[in-house]
Image (cartoon, rainbow, N blue to C red):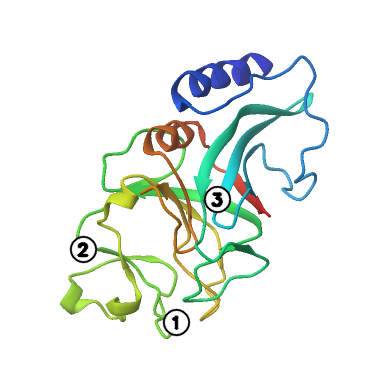
Amino acid sequence: MRRLVVGLCAVLCVIIGAPVIAPSAEAVVEPWFGNAVGNATQVVSVVGVGHSTAKIDVYQRTAAGWEPVAAGIPAHVGSGGITPQSREGVPTTPMGVYTLDSAFGTAPNPGGGLPYVQVGSDHWWDSDSNSPTYNTMQVCKKAQCPFNTAVSENLNIPQYRHAVVIGVNKARVPGASSAYFFHTTDGGPTAGCVAIDDATLVKIIGWLRPGAVMAIAK
């Protein structure tokens, strides 16, 4: 298991191009997210360092404990900052621990362990609070979509060259927020998502497996 983690670190450290650290001789005993991530063995940690900027560290749980795979990756978060809760239409990134269940992008599948959908102009993320498919991906022609496209997101944009769905409001409570992704940065704050450079994101997507989570804090 430790050999696997070292190998993963070698791949990420070479290609990420951000400050990184290799696993030390001793595992990290207690990262800040501690026991909040349940049985997860892969964690993408997002900690705010400014109003709309953050630092990402990537961790793998081994038999010895938590070990860092990569660290110090610069990220952008919501223009409204990181807050305890989120709601529809407010550009903040919610604190908490969220699943990373699937990925998508305008680019072909880069590989990895998560289900991936290559999206085009007919792919949408339904953010219409009155829609029965609220907070899900839908495929339809704009004029034929059964939800309000004016408040939803067309996924065929440069920022979604690659993206991982962050499991915010998985219960799909109307108005409790939608469309949170870990996606390619455009160099500025987001509407609530977490964004990093595309090359680094591709490597993380290739590393992620089912059961991975993202932990977000100020």
Residue 87 visible in the picture: yes
116 in relation to 170, above or below: above
Q: Quadrant of the N terminus?
A: top right
What residue is rendered at 55% in x and 50% in y? 53
At 44% from the left and 22% from the top, the residue drawn is 15
Give the Cα separation between the discs numbered 2 and 1.
20 Å
Count the numbered circles shown: 3
Q: Give x and y (percent) for residue 83.
A: 64, 65
- Identify residue for label 2: 122
* Residue under the point 68% across and 20% down: 23
Above or below residue 26? Residue 18 is below
Dot 2: element: loop
Which disc number belongs to residue 53? 3
Closer to the eye: label 1 or 3: 3
- 79 and 93: which one is in front? 79
Q: Residue at x 51, y 81 (%)?
A: 174
Quadrant into which the C terminus falls: bottom right
* Placement of 25 over or under 102, stated as above or below: above
* Residue 129 tag number: 1
